[in-house]
Image (cartoon, helix red, strand yellow):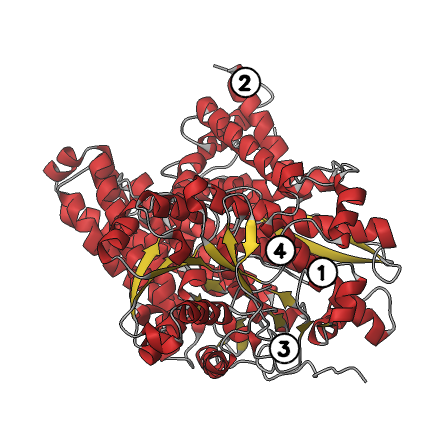
Amino acid sequence: MLYREAGQFKTSYAADQAVFPLREDRIGLAATLFAAFVLVPVFADDFFLSSIMIPFLIFACAAIGLNILTGYAGQLSLGTGAFMGVGAYAAYKLTSIFPETNIVLLVLVSGFFSAAIGIVFGLPSLRIKGLYLAVTTLAAQFFLEWCFIRIPWLYNYNSSGAIEVPQREAFGIIASGPAASALTRYFIVLAITLAVTVLMKNVIRGHIGRSWMMIRDMDIAAELIGIRPLYAKLSAFAVSSYICGLAGAMMVFFWLGAAEPSAFSISLSFQILFMAILGGLGSLMGSYFGAAFIWILPVVIRFAFPALGIDIGAETVQHLTFMIIGALIIFFLIAEPHGLARLWAIGKEKLRVWPFPYG
Amino acid sequence: MMLRKLAFGAACVALSGLAAGAVTQANAQDSIYVQLPTYRTGPYAGSGIPIANGMADYLTMLNERDGGIGGVKITFDECETGYDTQKGVECYEAAKANNTVVFNPWSTGITLQVIPKAAVDKIPILSMAYGLSAAAEGDVFPWVFNPPDTYWDGLSAIIKDIGEREGGLDNLKGKKIGYLFLDAGYGREPIPLLEQLAEKYGFAVTQYPVAGKEMQNQSSQWLNVRRDNPDYMIMWGWGAMNPTAVKEATKIRYPMDKFYGVWWAGGDDDARAGGAQAKGYRTLNFHGTGADYPALQDIKKLVVDAGKSQVEADKFGDNLYNRGVYNSILMAEAIRTAQEMTGKTAITAEDMRVGLENLNIDEARIKEIGLEGFMKPVKVTCENHSGHHQVYVQEWDGEKWVAASDWFAPMTDVVEPLLKQAAEDYVKSNAPWPERQAECATRS
């Protein structure tokens, strides 16, 4: 009733090709942005910002990165965690060398290092596909993790072997390090993640994104109609790794504040992969859904039990969280194998004809 | 179709759950809140569970027996970290939101994360005998405390004991010492000192790193140990790594009395894993084992027998359980000191820092809390937040830990300059590091 397109006429090609053709969608987007830029900063406390919103946005960004590669270009990757690590270590080294430079700029630049490494490890994708490719990206994961542990230059020869984020400024405001306020870090992460989303939405609608999807759907056919797999696959690896590297640098600089090599282990890769799969492969919206499901829901469950007055041990809550999240993952994937984004799309379809469904 | 509707329903419930969002918990004014980050799950749970039990039980006992500290109840809850740094940071944020007076990270990785935050958030960090060794430099790290000893004290104590057995440290020349360590911040921390000592005394060091995810598969490391055949082995292990190492050592018939562990490698279950052959395995310690102390008997009577503890009856008084108790003793005594110095009963985190900085548990006080012989006096000063306290070597007799040496001091003269150097390096690499803002508080 409220959500329908009747009466909305498109009178130009631009209107027809808009990202959000429906007025209701635009209103919804505006409301979400209003919530993200105004409501959250005004009402949220430090815990909500630093333990829920910032990691959620960073994981959403990483999931978008993986979604480019796995969801849109069809190249299964298990090396996300390591690519995030490359971004983090690159940003750390850059800021050690150029301490005066704007940290946001350095974080954005660090993605290029990750992209370069991603291209190198993407080369095997020209020959091998599917699960075999997953194994070579797994090799990237282990090799890069080994580098983070074994090359002391990367962590400035700290005796702890961890990278510790120093205090850095961006636009005259303290942006990283312990003195940076949660709000500043939230706005930086929000701005970067949104920029990545908008940019990717448009890249995917253009010829680059289409060439990725053609490669995904059938690489031989794509080749026959003039898509060059070399460019398509390697550009997917580069863009994906760039975004993952960005997310990794943000993770260390604007969320954790320090990281041991184990922070970028295979379990991080799987975490991001689950977010992408559960949210919906080949959907940017899904990346946000997946990140919310995997990151926010456990935190809420963990704090819901004490808030409801149920007095059980912290470890029992932990076990329960594992079980609930695990059961929900299975349930959602059985109900809709294409992920939460598909559920969302079906929901919108239904709403369009509600309350008088036909057909 | 039905399933899909259900899925919608579930999604809606989840969304509304998300909207309900942040939950904060109000604390009564007349209590002192301490959050205890613990790990009863995951690969490190074997070490984490006894510690969590010990910490909680001592505080419960104080509440039951004395009505808290200085007439104020201690409220505490656990936050499960799973030894995972991401979750640890989340626990820290939750602890901050609930106004904890002190934060015990119980993981070197989490400690490293929260050290820079401590000065900003004004929450003291108590990393008891773990974490960043350099944090002992109180002037650089006014908010971080690591009594009674640093890792470097521990390593120097092991070398000292080995030297003693060889008839003097000079006899270490030409010996080979193997170093088996968890390949994380924790295990790598002692390496600079080990290399320095090797140079000084002329022994060779071979390193055997064990990756965290392969803790339970150390056969390749021990194959190398068998090939290299070092005269002594030193282990820096934690969690599932310890019992695995002890088991592997017995399998290659490594002489167990030449196998040393730091205090964190000294769980009863760690040694028990090696069976009867593990007899002779030596680890450092800085407190007593067993339950033969009045305070521990109070815990038994008021907490364990009353069903308020999660500890299994036969694990009561285990080494790591007692270590949890020791951690709570430090907290409780610091709270008491803070109360005495500020005159307040419900102290704040900033008062707690003052309490920790003036912590002075002397023999008389140890006797008063009913722990005579359990521990040596602990004194923290403004400049030295660790203290290089005495330790002793204990030996596994197949059933339990028995003391194998007298209490002795670590090589303070070697460790001190190294700590200073490391603190300087830390400041340099973390520039701009804040100057000491918290004033050095002394008892007037």
For badge 4, the amino acid type reads Arg
Q: Residue at x 45, y 66 (%)?
A: B158
Mark 3–mark 2 Cα distance, whole angstroms, equals 68 Å
Q: Is mark 3 on a helix, strand or loop?
A: loop
The residue carrying pointer 2 sits among few (fewer than 14), some (14 to 19) or many (20 or more) residues within 10 Å by Cα, namely: few
**Front-most of B417 and B213?**
B417
Of circles 3 and 2, the one toward us is 3
Q: Is residue B410 left or right of residue A271?
A: right
The residue carrying pointer 1 sits among few (fewer than 14), some (14 to 19) or many (20 or more) residues within 10 Å by Cα, namely: some
For badge 1, the amino acid type reads Ile
**Residue named by callout 1:** B329
**Chain hosting mark 3:** B
For badge 3, the amino acid type reads Pro
Please state the horizontal and vertical placement of residue A88, each as a whole percent of the image: 38, 63
Mark 4–mark 2 Cα distance, whole angstroms, equals 67 Å
Q: Residue at x 61, y 28 (%)?
A: A1
**Front-most of A29 and B237?**
B237
For badge 2, the amino acid type reads Pro
**Residue named by callout 3:** B142
Q: Do labels 3 and 2 share a chain?
A: no
- Dot 3 or dot 4, earlier in sequence: 3
Q: Are marks 3 and 4 in contact (CB under 8 Å)?
A: no
Q: Residue at x 75, y 62 (%)?
A: B332
Mark 1–mark 2 Cα distance, whole angstroms, equals 68 Å
Q: Which mark is residue B323?
A: 4
The residue carrying pointer 4 sits among few (fewer than 14), some (14 to 19) or many (20 or more) residues within 10 Å by Cα, namely: many
**Chain hosting mark 4:** B
Q: What element carries label 4?
A: helix
**Chain hosting mark 2:** A
- Dot 3 or dot 1, earlier in sequence: 3
**Residue named by callout 2:** A357
Q: Do the residues labelled 3 and 2 touch (CB within 8 Å)?
A: no
